[in-house]
C-alpha cells in the first residue's frame, strides 16, 4: 500500500493530461523526461505497465550534441539510397510518392498550395521494408543507446523483452525503431493533422 501511494505521488508530478473522462481516475499518462529516468525507476515503470498504461518518455535525444536528427542530417544520411516513399498529404489525406530527399527538403523549402495553405506531408512507419539499422546505422546506434528501461525496450538484448526470446524460425514482430516524421506547424491550421496518434499494431507504436 505504501509503495502504491509513493507511485501515485510521483505520478502526479510527472504526468500529462490525456483525457477528460469524468468517471475515470486514469486521465493522465506517466510522462517523465529522459534525464529524470534512472536505473532504479524500473519498478515505477512496471507499476504502470502492469495496469496496461502507456509510458511516454520525453526528450529522449535531448542530450545529443550533433545534427543527426535534424532534417538536413536525415537527408544526408539517406542521400545514397534516395528512394521513392509513400507520404500522406495531411490536409487532403491523399497519398503520393516522393523521393526521401524531396521529403526532407520540404522542411526548408516549404511551398504553399494555391489556397495559401502550406504543404503538410507525413512519412509514417518508415523504413517499411528494411531495418532502421541497415538504412540509418548511425541513427540506430544513437537511438538505442538512449533508450530508457532497456530491459524491456532494447530490440536485441532486452532481458524482459519477450520478442527477443522468440526462436529464429518464427514470425517475430518488427521491433524497429520505426520513424513517424511529418512537416508540422506550431499553429493549428483548423484542418489536417500531422500528428500520429499513440496506437498498437503487432507491437505498440
Image (spheres, helix red, strand yellow):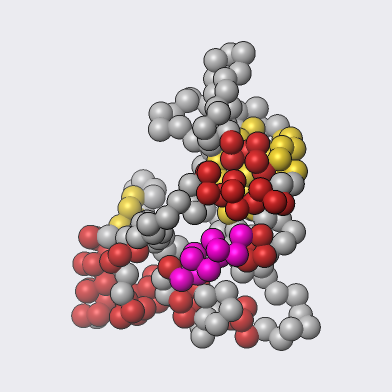
Quadrant in which the C terminus is drawn: bottom right
Q: Residue furthest right?
A: 169
Residue 141 magenta-highlighted: yes
| Spot occupied by residue 12 in the image (x, y as percentages of width and height) | 24, 60
- Which is more toward the observer, 29 or 24? 29
Majority SS type along the magenta span: helix
Vertical side of 198 occupied by 113: above or below? above
Vertical side of 52 occupied by 185: above or below? above
Quadrant in which the N terminus is drawn: bottom left
For the question of whether residue 48 can be seen, the reply is yes
Q: How many marks?
A: 0
- Is 151 placed left or right of 172 in the picture? left
- Is 198 placed left or right of 46 in the picture? right
- Which is more toward the observer, 62 or 91? 62
- Which is more toward the observer, 23 or 18? 18
| Spot occupied by residue 47 in the image (x, y as percentages of width and height) | 37, 75
Residue at 59% x, 48% y: name it.
76
Vertical side of 14 occupied by 109: above or below? above
For the question of whether residue 23 can be seen, the reply is no
Residue at 39% x, 48% y: name it.
19
Residue at 45% x, 51% y: name it.
67
Residue 108 magenta-highlighted: no
| Spot occupied by residue 170 in the image (x, y as percentages of width and height) | 76, 80
- Where does the magenta region start and end? 136-145
| Spot occupied by residue 4 in the image (x, y as percentages of width and height) | 27, 76
Asked where in the image residue 171 lies, by quadrant, the reply is: bottom right
Residue at 62% x, 13% y: name it.
114
Amino acid at each position: 500500500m505504501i509503495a502504491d501511494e509513493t507511485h501515485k505521488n510521483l505520478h502526479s508530478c510527472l504526468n500529462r493530461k490525456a483525457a477528460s473522462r469524468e468517471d475515470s481516475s486514469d486521465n493522465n499518462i506517466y510522462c517523465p523526461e529522459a534525464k529524470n529516468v534512472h536505473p532504479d525507476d524500473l519498478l515505477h515503470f512496471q507499476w504502470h505497465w502492469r495496469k496496461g498504461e502507456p509510458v511516454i518518455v520525453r526528450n529522449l535525444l535531448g542530450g545529443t550534441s550533433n545534427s543527426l536528427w535534424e532534417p538536413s542530417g536525415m537527408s544526408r544520411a539517406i542521400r545514397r539510397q534516395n528512394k521513392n516513399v509513400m507520404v500522406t498529404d495531411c490536409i487532403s489525406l491523399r497519398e503520393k510518392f516522393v523521393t526521401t530527399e524531396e521529403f526532407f527538403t520540404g522542411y526548408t523549402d516549404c511551398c504553399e498550395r494555391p489556397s495559401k495553405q502550406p504543404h503538410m506531408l507525413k512519412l509514417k512507419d518508415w523504413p517499411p521494408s528494411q531495418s532502421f539499422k541497415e538504412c540509418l546505422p548511425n541513427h540506430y546506434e544513437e537511438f538505442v543507446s538512449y533508450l530508457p528501461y532497456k530491459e524491456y525496450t532494447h530490440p536485441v538484448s532486452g532481458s524482459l523483452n519477450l520478442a527477443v526470446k522468440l526462436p529464429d524460425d518464427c514470425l517475430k514482430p518488427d521491433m524497429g525503431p520505426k520513424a513517424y516524421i511529418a512537416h508540422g506547424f506550431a499553429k493549428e491550421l483548423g484542418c489536417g493533422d500531422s500528428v500520429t496518434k499513440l496506437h498498437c499494431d503487432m507491437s505498440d507504436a
